[in-house]
């Protein structure tokens, strides 16, 4: 009796809410959107900034909640996910669906008040993540390719929110975050390989923790590095990068490449986890360098 009472306390409800929407992931996505906005805007409008943060959080939270509804039975099989609110029995599917639906509606409405294109890309992101990426995860490693599309939208979305325009600039931001996701998610798929196998998820490109996967991880890391410095050459419209900033971004890319090569050499879960952590640091620092470079150039 005592346990049932404590299970519905305010702290536990808040904790489950954070988990069903994956708050930390959602906040990192919001960070990318705000970085894209700051890169595209001429004069910062703090109202738009707040709307973008709220709308972005709702959209990501909705995607994560729908994902956990669809994968509830598979989540129960894996150590990493078995204590999530739905498989652990702390939240019903109905409650999660209501949260996801409300977040979707609020997210689209809020992003629509910024401009139509921002709302459209936000809606596309939810659809691809929920209706295409999630079902494909148990069927083919190509799910990572599909999942990289909604995952790359936030950085681009910020620029579209600032300019109401889609061109070479947001396309470049999209490409950077798109290529980055392959080494990032393959690193996760590597060190969680056995756990993912319990749920029947196919995350690695070869389906194995082998040299083929490690080589592809290196190749996509190189692509990420190259795309990140393209703005220094003046090919990307008003998205520019100074030589100093490009050198910094290049060095950050070499750091990530070091860990990708290390994975190839060591072929261990420890090396994969280090690459994952390096990739998170990389994308965050690159976005910070881009933004600072714009405002001090």
Image: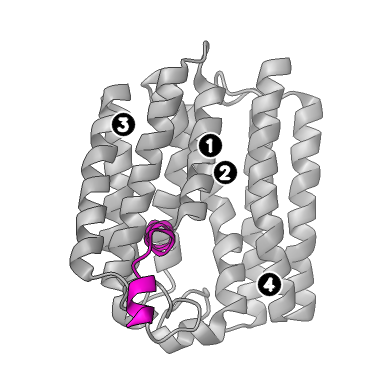
Q: Nearer the viewer, residue 233 or 53?
A: 53
Foreground label between 3 and 4: 3
Of mark 3 and mark 1, the one earlier in the sequence is 3
| Mark 3 and mark 1 residues within 8 Å of each other at the beta carbon | no
Q: Nearer the viewer, residue 233 or 190?
A: 190
Q: Secondary structure at mark 1?
A: helix
Residue at 77% across, 67% down: 261
Residue lying farthest to the top in this orientation:
43
Of mark 3 and mark 2, the one earlier in the sequence is 3
Q: Nearer the viewer, residue 241 or 78?
A: 78
Please name the residue that numbered disc 2 is placed on: 176
Q: Secondary structure at mark 2?
A: helix
Please name the residue that numbered disc 3 is placed on: 111
| Mark 3 and mark 2 residues within 8 Å of each other at the beta carbon | no
Horizontal and vertical percent position of residue 199: 40, 84
Mark 2 nearby-residue class (10 Å; few <14, some 14–19, many ≥20): many
| Mark 1 and mark 4 residues within 8 Å of each other at the beta carbon | no
Q: Which residues are magenta?
A: 1-21
Q: Secondary structure at mark 4?
A: helix
Examine the rendering and report whether any part of residue 252 can be seen. yes
Q: Nearer the viewer, residue 90 or 82?
A: 90
Please name the residue that numbered disc 1 is placed on: 173
Left or right of 54? Residue 290 is right
Horizontal and vertical percent position of residue 252: 77, 46
Residue 179 versus residue 164 in the image, above or below: below
Left or right of 224? Residue 80 is left
Residue 195 got which mark? none
């Amino acid at each position: 009796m005592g346990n049932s009472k404590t299970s519905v306390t305010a702290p536990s409800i808040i904790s489950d809410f954070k988990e069903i929407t994956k708050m930390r992931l959602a906040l990192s996505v919001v960070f990318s959107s705000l970085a894209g906005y700051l890169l595209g805007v001429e004069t910062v409008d703090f109202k738009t900034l707040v709307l973008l943060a709220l709308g972005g959080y709702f959209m990501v939270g909705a995607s994560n909640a729908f994902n956990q509804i669809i994968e509830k039975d598979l989540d129960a099989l894996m150590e990493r996910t078995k204590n999530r609110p739905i498989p652990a029995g702390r939240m019903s599917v109905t409650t999660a669906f209501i949260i996801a639906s409300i977040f979707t509606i609020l997210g689209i409405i809020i992003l629509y008040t910024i401009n139509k294109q921002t709302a459209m890309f936000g809606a596309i992101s939810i659809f691809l993540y929920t209706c295409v990426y999630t079902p494909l995860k148990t069927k083919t490693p190509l799910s990572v390719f599909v999942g990289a599309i909604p995952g790359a939208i936030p950085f681009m979305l910020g620029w579209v929110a600032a300019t109401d325009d889609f061109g070479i600039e947001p396309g470049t931001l999209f490409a950077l975050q798109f290529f980055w996701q392959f080494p990032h998610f393959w690193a996760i798929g590597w060190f969680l390989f056995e756990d993912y196998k319990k749920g029947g998820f196919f995350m690695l490109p070869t389906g194995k923790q082998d040299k083929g996967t490690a080589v592809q991880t290196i190749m996509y890391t190189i692509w990420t590095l190259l795309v990140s410095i393209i703005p220094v050459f003046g090919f990307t419209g008003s998205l520019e990068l100074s030589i100093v900033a490009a050198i910094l971004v290049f060095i950050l890319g070499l750091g990530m490449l070091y860990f990708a090569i290390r994975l190839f050499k060591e072929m261990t879960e420890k090396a994969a986890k280090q690459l994952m952590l390096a990739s998170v640091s990389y994308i965050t620092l690159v976005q910070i360098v881009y933004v600072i470079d714009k405002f001090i150039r």
